[in-house]
Amino acid sequence: MPSNGLVLEPGHVYRTRDLSQWTANPARLARRLVDGGLLKPLAQGLFVHPRPSRFGDVPPADEEVMRAFLDSPFVLTGPERWNALGLGTSAAFATQLVYNTKRSGEFTFGGRRFLLRRVAFPERPSPEWFVVDLFQHAEQAAADRGDLTTALASAVRDRRFDTERLRSRAREYGSLDTQTRVASALSASQAA
């Protein structure tokens, strides 16, 4: 294996071009590292330095894969984040939903599927933004919008969400239907 200062971080995802800091021919180095078991291919030009565990290699985090693949801002969203809001959803997808500024389409990395969409999203998504995102994708989450509105009103009453931020995120990122439902939930929370 190369001894030219090569230090790979376990669980880190590398692009072929990332290896150019150690060689003038990164593609050849990538092949040598794969052949030597130091890198595992995830997709064309994308590799992970495996992090071993007693049960085998730990796959890289979704965030790590997207960081290397997109090399631009992104946010992971979907059922895992929607279900954590406590609004009664329990959906599951086989594909990770990723909003970004660069690509759209479905991609597979290391056997895991990612659905990428070029859509607007805040730099630092808040729980209130994820609420709006859930309303925008209620059908995909197998959730009834009316039930979501009722659950949101109860959550706002319990002070689980910031009302001004919720209103603002709905205006900025929600459809007219989502804005109406969020406003209805906010009104219902104050009436009770």
Image (cartoon, rainbow, N blue to C red):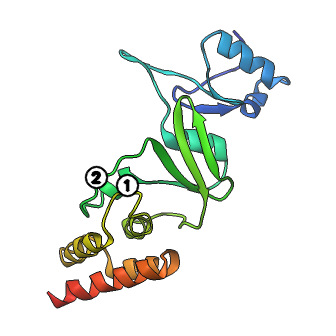
Residue 58 falls in image quadrant:
top left
The answer to whether residue 44 is left or right of residue 77 is right
Question: Compared with residue 159, is residue 134 higher up or lower down, i.e. above or below?
Answer: above
Residue visible at 44% across and 78% down in the picture: 170
Mark 2: give few (<14), some (14-19) or many (20+) Cα within 10 Å. some
Q: CA distance from mark 2 to mark 1?
A: 10 Å
Q: Position of residue 48 (x, y in %)?
A: 58, 27
**Location of the C terminus (image quadrant):** bottom left
SS category of the residue bearing label 1: helix
Residue 11: which disc? Answer: none
Q: Nearer the viewer, mark 2 or mark 1?
A: 2
Say if 186 sits above or below 74 in the image: below
Q: At 30% across and 67% down in the image, what residue appears? A: 144
Q: Camera-side residue: 46 or 11?
A: 46
Q: Is residue 95 left or right of residue 40?
A: left
The residue beneath circle 1 is 81
28 vs 20, nearest the viewer: 28
Tell me the crowding category of disc 1: few under 14, some 14 to 19, or many 20 or more residues within 10 angstroms, Cα based: some
Look at the image and tell me whether residue 87 can be seen: yes
Q: Which labelled disc corresponds to residue 90?
A: 2
**Quadrant including the N terminus:** top right
Inspect this view and state whether residue 3 appears.
no
- Report the side of 1 relative to 140 (left or right): right
Amino acid on which the number 2 mark rests in the picture? Ser
Q: Is residue 120 above or below residue 95?
A: below
Q: 155 or 138, which is in the foreground?
A: 138
Relative placement, left or right, of 36 versus 114 is right
Name the spot of residue 158 as percent of width and height, x first.
18, 74
Residue situated furthest left in the rendering: 192
At numbered mark 2, what does the secondary structure look like: helix, strand or loop? loop
Q: Amino acid at mark 1?
A: Arg
